[in-house]
Amino acid sequence: MTSTLDVLRLTPGLARYFRWLDPDIRRRIASGAVWSILGAGFASGLAMLSNVISARFLGATHFGELAIVLATTNLFTTLFTSGLSMTASKYVAEHRDTDPARAGAVIGLSWVTSIAVGLATALLILPFAPWLSTGALGAPGLANAIRLGGIVMLFAALNGSQVGALSGLEAFDQVAYGNLVRGVATILLVTLGAAAGGVNGALAGYILVGAITAVYYQILVRRQCAARSVAISYKFGKEDVSILWRFTLPVLVTTFSFTPAAWWSNVLLAKTSGYSEAGVFGAAFHWQMFITFFSSAVSRIGLPMLSNVRAEQDAARYKRCLAINFLLTAAPAIAIATPVALGAHFIVSLYGPSFQSGAAALALISLAAVFNAINIPVGHAIWSLDATTSGVLLALLNGAVLAASAYALSGKGAAGLAGAYVIMGAVQTAVNIPFMIWLLRQRFSSPLPAPEAAAA
């Protein structure tokens, strides 16, 4: 709890909002934040160490190949399964207190859907791997790597729905334990695979990590449901299934609006400047996740807590929770990004001589990470208040700005793509802040509608 209180002391306005919250909300935010930070710290720190070691084994070119393969499989994972984690998180949080049976049905629905969609997408990748390798990536030798990436994607889909269920139950300590298991498995299996089998060996390591994590999370979900008297059900009514097109589908459309642009930008970099520059950018981009690990960790409490508070129909309580989440995501990102940007030359030297040109890219990514953290709570408000159309439009804007900026800066290598992310973040912030003010005024100018009524 010390970490949360330290942040509060650094931000007087944040401390004031925190004191205004009732004791139950203060306890839930503090506990959730601490466990989420610990879990993200485990995952980010161990993953970063694994990346550094793997990069030294593979070199810039092969590390770039690994990064592109993972980016390609992550594209399919995010496109087809991103909404399942958010669906479980939102609706389990809304119903776990008032309707435990409905919460159990949502958990079962998310799990079954993630298996079906994950398997279908993985099987879809297998026959198209040669085309993706040759036609899309311009690297015929990566077909087998893409096939392995499809299996990585399957386990990522399963783990996403399970983490969403645990978040909806506010079992953030269990998510932290799962992150520790995943982080330890990553540094052991992925680095060993990279040393023994290159890119394919590293991907085989990711497959084993995904399988181990999926089994562990499934055990945790069942234990938490039993402790909270939430019976997981695989019998779904029309009202349960309607969640998929009422909420999950808009999230999916939002993902389609942005994620392909991010993938295309990486592929454009590889084709224009070579896989060595793609490897340099991949190394730099991993530091965005490190910079935002605190913010992302705290943000995991945002959607389930806001959804749960929204169900209570208390507008003032909702706004205070949103304010505390907003400030908790921005402040730590700024604090971490500053030393990373200042120490960019030293950091890239850790990856080996072939990464020395990445200092400028890392400094720019640090700034982009700050913009990313500032905009995280906007998504929480959008989805908890069912402003799905706005979410789609904002994601479409982000994707268009990123694609246009990446194309304009395509000749600048890794630093150019990092600059494109900075431009996207600046435009996103300039649009999102006024939108957030408007959304709150619009939603709370009258009594907050019931969740089911708003979603109908």
Image: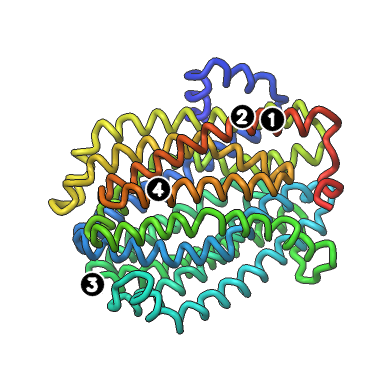
Spatial CA distance of label 3 from label 1 is: 55 Å
Q: Residue at x 51, y 68 (%)?
A: 155
Q: Nearer the viewer, residue 169 or 71?
A: 71
Q: Amino acid at mark 4?
A: Ser
Q: Which residue is mark 2?
A: 434
Q: Which residue is mark 3?
A: 196
Under circle 4, the secondary element is helix
Spatial CA distance of label 3 from label 4 is: 23 Å
Q: Amino acid at mark 2?
A: Pro
Q: Along the polypeptide, which appears first: circle 3 or circle 2? A: 3
Q: Of the numbered discs in the image, which one, if any, rests on residue 44? A: 4
1 and 2 marks in contact (CB < 8 Å): yes
**Local crowd at mark 3 within 10 Å, few (<14), some, or many (≥20)?**
few
Residue 177 lies, in percent from the top left, at 50, 52
Q: Residue at x 66, y 51 (%)?
A: 89
Q: Along the polypeptide, which appears first: circle 2 or circle 4? A: 4
Q: Is 344 above or below relative to 162?
A: above
Q: Residue at x 56, y 76 (%)?
A: 119
Q: Along the polypeptide, which appears first: circle 3 or circle 1? A: 3
Q: Amino acid at mark 1?
A: Trp
Spatial CA distance of label 4 from label 1 is: 35 Å
Spatial CA distance of label 2 from label 4 is: 32 Å
Q: Along the polypeptide, which appears first: circle 4 or circle 1? A: 4
Q: Which residue is mark 1?
A: 438
Residue 339 lies, in percent from the top left, at 30, 31
In the figure, residue 182 lies in which quadrant? Answer: bottom left
Spatial CA distance of label 1 from label 2 is: 6 Å
Q: Along the polypeptide, which appears first: circle 3 or circle 4? A: 4
367 relative position to 8: left or right: left
